[in-house]
């Protein structure tokens, strides 16, 4: 016999439906949908049925139910991207750090010379903040500031020189 999960009445079925439809985060939206499906109708769906509908395992659904029952609606949202105020990690750079980074990107040369890259931004953050951030952190901050990867178009190894190209165009 399938396991019928017992949801504590933290929210009504209608409130679960509204949370599902209004949620912006994909992962949280799936969690709200699972809870809403579990609460629907006079005979609730089993964990296996909901897991199959959402392409999740029945154990995932069971963990979600236990977490929701223990923590209420606050336990449904994703914690790892929530920020320091809700149990996540604080951002490496605050607003002043972001402004300083943007100023450095526009007016200074990167550590080691050359062009700014994600690795060089990570080095800059490490020197400025006195921490050793993950190597991808620099790339994330470049994206936040609206920068994208800019590389010159590769040229063919046997391409003609400028003079040869001009001579060819004159003959045509």
Image (spheres, helix red, strand yellow):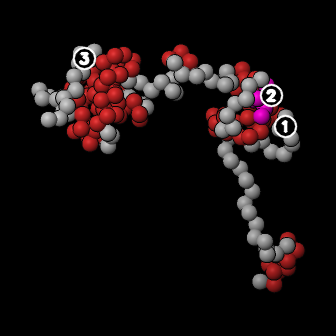
Q: Secondary structure at mark 3?
A: loop
Q: Is disc 3 surrounded by few (<14), some (14 to 19) or many (20+) residues within 10 Å? A: some
Residue sticking out furthest to the left: 42
Q: Quadrant of residue 36?
A: top left
Tell me the CA gap for discs 2 and 3. Answer: 50 Å
The quarter of the displayed image where residue 159 is located: bottom right
Locate residue 38, reporting x and y percent.
Answer: 23, 29
**Residue 155 drawn at (x, y percent):** 76, 66
For this rendering, which residue is in front, 91 or 15? 91
Q: Tell me, for residue 111, which label it has, or none.
A: 1
Q: Position of residue 54 (x, y in %)?
A: 30, 40
* Contact check, label 1 and label 2, Cβ < 8 Å: yes
The boundaries of the magenta stretch are 123-128
Residue 72 in the image: above or below residue 65 = above
Give the residue number, with chain letter if any, for mark 3: 8
Does the segment drawn in magenta span residue 81? no
Which of the 4 image quadrants contains residue 103? Answer: top right
* Prevailing secondary structure of the magenta residues: helix
Q: Is residue 116 left or right of residue 44?
A: right
Q: Give the residue pinned by disc 2.
A: 127
For the point 32% across and 22% down, the residue is: 66
Nearer to us: label 1 or label 3: 3
Marks 2 and 3 close (CB-CB < 8 Å): no
């Amino acid at each position: 016999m399938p396991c019928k999960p017992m949801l504590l009445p933290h929210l009504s079925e209608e409130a679960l439906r509204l949370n599902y439809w209004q949620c912006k985060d994909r992962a949280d939206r799936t969690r709200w949908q699972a809870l809403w499906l579990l609460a629907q109708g006079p005979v609730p769906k089993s964990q296996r049925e909901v897991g199959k509908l959402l392409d999740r395992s029945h154990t995932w659904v069971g963990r979600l139910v236990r977490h929701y029952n223990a923590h209420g609606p606050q336990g449904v949202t994703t914690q790892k991207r929530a920020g320091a105020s809700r149990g996540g990690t604080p951002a490496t750079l605050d607003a002043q750090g972001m402004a300083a980074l943007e100023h450095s990107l526009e007016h200074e040369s990167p550590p080691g010379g050359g062009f700014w890259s994600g690795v060089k931004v990570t080095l800059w953050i490490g020197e400025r903040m006195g921490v050793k951030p993950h190597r991808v952190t620099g790339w994330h901050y470049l994206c936040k500031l609206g920068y994208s990867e800019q590389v010159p178009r590769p040229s063919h190894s046997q391409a003609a020189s400028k003079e040869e190209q001009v001579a060819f165009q004159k003959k045509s």
